[in-house]
Image (spheres, rainbow, N blue to C red):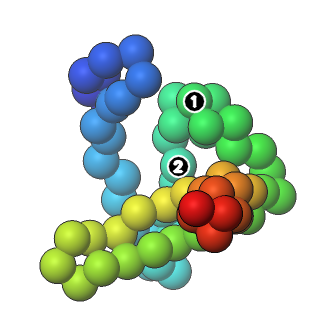
Amino acid sequence: MKNIQEDRFIVSVRVGPKGQITIPVQAREMFNIKEGDTIMVMGDKNKGIALIKDDAFYQMMDGLSKK
């Protein structure tokens, strides 16, 4: 894990045989990810993959719909 700033980091994870990854503890702590939480997986073929907690995603979408 490489800390870039207090609120950012870069880390590599390995994909297991079932296509699973482990979210590093530092990321789970930073984003308050707990066992049983739902994570949205978003992808763009040219830009890559992003993960976001579902509650944060729905809050973001709700904010966009009110503009």
Q: CA gap, disc 2 to disc 1? A: 11 Å
Q: Which residue is mark 1?
A: 30
Precedes in sequence: disc 2 or disc 1: 2
Which residue sits at x=79%, y=51%?
Answer: 35
Tell me the crowding category of disc 1: few under 14, some 14 to 19, or many 20 or more residues within 10 angstroms, Cα based: few
Using the image as rendered, state which of residue 42 and residue 57 is in the foreground: 57
Query: Is residue 41 positioned above or below 37 on the image?
Result: below
Using the image as rendered, state which of residue 15 and residue 66 is in the foreground: 66
Could you say whether the residue bearing mark 1 is in a helix, strand or loop? Answer: helix
> Can you give x and y, in whole percent of width and height, for residue 48 in the image?
26, 70
Q: Nearer the viewer, mark 2 or mark 1?
A: 1
Q: Horizontally, is 41 left or right of 47 in the view?
A: right
User: What amino acid is at disc 1?
Assistant: Met
The answer to whether residue 46 is visible is: yes
Quadrant assignment for the C terminus: bottom right
> Can you give x and y, in whole percent of width and height, for residue 66 in the image?
66, 63
> Can you give x and y, in whole percent of width and height, for residue 52 in the image?
56, 57
Query: Is residue 64 positioned above or below 42 on the image?
Result: above
Q: Quadrant of residue 57?
A: bottom right
> Can you give x and y, in whole percent of width and height, for residue 5 in the image?
31, 17
The mark found on residue 23 in the picture is 2
Q: Horizontally, is 27 left or right of 55 in the view?
A: left
Tell me the crowding category of disc 2: few under 14, some 14 to 19, or many 20 or more residues within 10 angstroms, Cα based: few
User: What amino acid is at disc 2?
Assistant: Ile
